[in-house]
Image (cartoon, grey):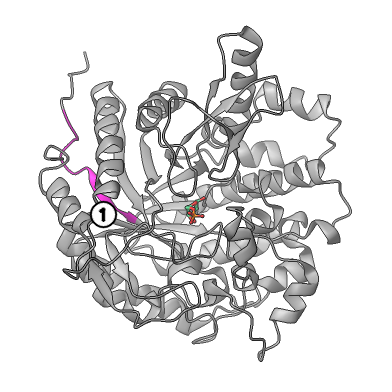
Amino acid sequence: MKQYRAGFPEGFLWGGAVAANQCEGAYNVDGKGLSTADMVPFRPDKVAANIADMDASYDEIIRFMDPNCKENLPKRRGCDFYHHYKEDIKMFAEMGFGIFRTSIAWSRIYPTGFETEPNEKGLQFYDDLFDECLKYNIQPLVSLSHYEMPIEITLRNNGWESRETIDLFVKFAKTCFERYKDKVKYWIPFNEINMVRTSVYVGGGCLLEKSMLDLQTLRYQLTHHQMVASALCVKLCHEIIPDAMIGCMIARLETYPATCNPIDVAKAMEENQMNLFYLDIAARGEYPGYLIRFLHDNNIQLDIREEDDEILKNGKVDFVSFSYYMSYLASYESGKSKNSGNLVESEVNPYLEVSAWKWPVDPVGLRITLNTLYDRYQLPIFVLENGLGAVDEISEDGKIHDDYRIDYLRRHIMEMKKAVQDGVDLLGYTTWGPIDIVSQGTCQMKKRYGFIYVDMDDYGNGTYGRIKKDSFYWYKMVIESNGEDLK
Ligand code: BGP
């Protein structure tokens, strides 16, 4: 009989998460090639309208590849983690991190993606980074793909539209598994593998304007190629690093019915299914029936090869994981007023407050999602992103009193603890952006998530100096008490 668990288990992995393209900078240093993220400009008009526009067009890409281009491209500078990582990781260790999630920038290792030999300086950077983590007993957790594909693969293959990109990605993954097998024991092939439903460019390195497919078919073809690549990576990781764990990650879009009308409940069920099917495939090794129905009903014909069934069956993951910021509403009626959101907008939920970027705040939804996923898969779980993007000001006393961030995280950790008491096998929790980094959706520095403030604005002006916020000391206390002391 299972024992009741009153709190977070011993060895629970507390930490933080970043993405190479949002923090490292050094976009063309030590042999790194240009990536899709290097082509996304800061768009003040879109930001003013609170629209997440992460796409780039073919013409923009060609224009921005010019070494003399003067466009403001924030993901090329991040918060200069590439040159500050020792100082930053030392502060993560001061908070007591047990785990640090980051991505390996594909174009640091294979600058165009097509090389037969990797870029040694790129490999060495991550060797040094992981050594720095392990020096403080911080376990690295690596996302192999976090929206930063070599731009050459976009230009030659149209990203994940070409089946050849599977081989390019597996080559990159194999290089990383073999190089870091003694340092990295936690892996995910893709960050938010459902991103292509929002942006085929960000999620799939793909330009719709260059595709032979309609958008719907393209989305599911990109997804199929990524699910096959993910399964091949799982098998390879198990062969090369037998004591590692490799998982699948989605942006969890926890969706409630807007009313108790059964057709709204059914709509929410369908929305949740279309968010969870990626984990279904990764955990069970096959397409679920409702997805096959969806593809049939929408006349989506995919290029699925004979060997793919076997690949998916042999590539089942060791854990499931997700990013969680908010919850969503679904109703059959259209035209209701909307909030902004992570990946997709959501109808206004009258019971929820919203952040400064109009993302609804719903800590209870985190407990619901953890129970849903554990009941569905009976696999260990990581929460790999959770946090509040906010405008942080330096007060007259030179400090940053981000009690709003402490409140957001406290309420989410309390619900996470309830999920642990519900019996969920939760391995760890990495807050998003433990240090201020460039926003994925808006390319802003102004939208800050960190426990550590970085003196830099949306145009790259500033000293890049670091300041510990009030939440730095709060999170240190939370970790020291293993989630018991949340004050
Ligand atoms: C998720 C991404 C992260 C991160 C987060 C916050 O979708 O995985 O890269 O950026 O969103 O979003 P934003 O940075 O737009 O506030």
Along the line of sight, which residue is nearer the eye, 458 or 312? 458
- In the image, what residue type sits under mark 1? Asp
Q: Is residue 166 left or right of residue 297?
A: left
User: Mark 1 = which residue?
Assistant: 402
Q: Residue furthest front?
A: 396
Residue 102 screen position, x and y as percent? 40, 61
Name the magenta segment's main secondary structure: loop
Q: Is 311 contained in the magenta span?
A: no
Question: At x 50% / y 44%, what residue is drawn?
Answer: 358
Q: Residue 160 sits in which quadrant?
A: bottom right
Along the line of sight, which residue is nearer the eye, 151 or 301? 151
Question: At x 62% / y 8%, what residue is drawn?
Answer: 262
Q: Is residue 73 above or below residue 12?
A: below
Residue 289 screen position, x and y as percent? 68, 21
Tell me the crowding category of disc 1: few under 14, some 14 to 19, or many 20 or more residues within 10 angstroms, Cα based.
Answer: some
Q: Is residue 465 left or right of residue 485?
A: right
Q: Is residue 333 left or right of residue 48?
A: right
Span of residues in magenta:
7-16
Q: Is residue 389 above or below residue 275?
A: below
Q: Is mark 1 within 8 Å of ligand 1?
A: no
Question: At x 26% / y 28%, what residue is drawn?
Answer: 420
**How many dots with numbers?**
1
Residue 284 screen position, x and y as percent? 55, 30
Regarding mark 1 in the picture, which secondary structure is present there?
loop
Q: Residue 138 sits in which quadrant?
A: bottom left
Is residue 109 something that shows in the picture? no
